[in-house]
Image (cartoon, rainbow, N blue to C red):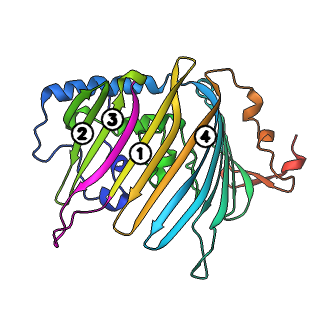
Amino acid sequence: MFRIRVRGVASQALAGTLLAIGIVGYSPCLAAVDDAEQVLQKLANSRVQLTSGIYRIEGERHIQRGERDERYPVTMRCAFDHAKKSSHFQRSERIPWLEDGVQVDGGLEVGLQLIRRPDSIYLYRSGVGPEALTIRSPDFAIESPVMPIDIRTLGLTTFVEGEQARRLELALESFSPEGVVKCEKNDGVWEIQWRISSKGPTIMTTLQVDETKQFSPIKLSYHLEHTQADGAQEQWGQTSEVTWKEVSGVWVPESARIEHRNARTTTTYDLKVAWEKVNEAIDPAQFEMKSMELPGPTLVSDHRTGGPVLVGTFDELP
């Protein structure tokens, strides 16, 4: 049911050195493994209770590098209907940016709009590269300075690189009961731990799941169990903390705080989620190209049949 996926539990710099969860000499208690399997299954079941909705996220990314202190606004909006395999995701964010080797104050504003439909996707990126709307096949891999997210994966990833765009199924498969070294419950909160190790440092992974909130993930953390040659503890770590609220009998994210830290830099996302609809019917017009409301001169090209075919400009399309 669950598969071990190393890429989901470490940065790319460490992923190549890791083998799998719990395979190097740790002897997990069978009772802990059994408990973890049940908790992880209930966690998976709870994530699919959210079937449709409209939400908006506002927040900021805070980057601390030595004496530099940078803050960049983040906004997202999404309408989705998983039963119809349709969604319309929008994201606008300022990102750190260099021009001629000099950092631009305030960063660069970049944006993404993505409509997913069973037959195709519509992708519009702004801020970097040519600003054009492209029509792609449904399995097209998105590449962008800012990525779409599946709101159901909050608490199951730490927003590292391409993890932001990870599908729910892959996020769940990142956690396997077989490698568990600890699974305990305290005041309705389950804490599951794994150790990942090979010839390099050991990574401790901890996932907390709140049984009283429909088995929602409230905290995920990764940190190194490693002492450097000078005796100092390694400072690398990643943490994701999510608060939840109940709407129409379903627990949905209300806020998230995600932190990445190493010896030089600490990056923190602080996000607030406002829900307009939860498990209600979504107007199909939300998933039409015109709902993107792009500037008329925007070029539109179709890439589903090999080479790109120019369809026209946005204001010319029916």
Q: Amino acid at mark 1?
A: Ser
Q: What is the distance, in whole Å, between disc 2 and disc 3 at their CAs? A: 9 Å
* Badge 2: residue crowd in 10 Å (few <14, some 14–19, many ≥20): many
Mark number displayed over residue 240: 1
The reply to whether residue 118 is in sight is no
Residue beneath label 4, please? 138
**Looking at the image, is 251 positioned above or below residue 179?**
above
Residue beneath label 3, please? 208
Stretch of the chain drawn in magenta: 215-236
In this rendering, the label closer to the viewer, 3 or 4 = 3
Q: Amino acid at mark 3?
A: Gln
Counting from the top left corner in percent of width and height, residue 127 is at 69, 62
Q: What is the distance, in whole Å, between disc 3 and disc 4 at their CAs? A: 34 Å
**Looking at the image, is 299 positioned above or below residue 244?**
below
Mark 4 and mark 3 in contact (Cβ < 8 Å)? no
First-in-chain label (2 vs 1): 2
Q: Amino acid at mark 2?
A: Gln
Q: Amino acid at mark 4?
A: Pro
Name the secondary structure under disc 4.
loop
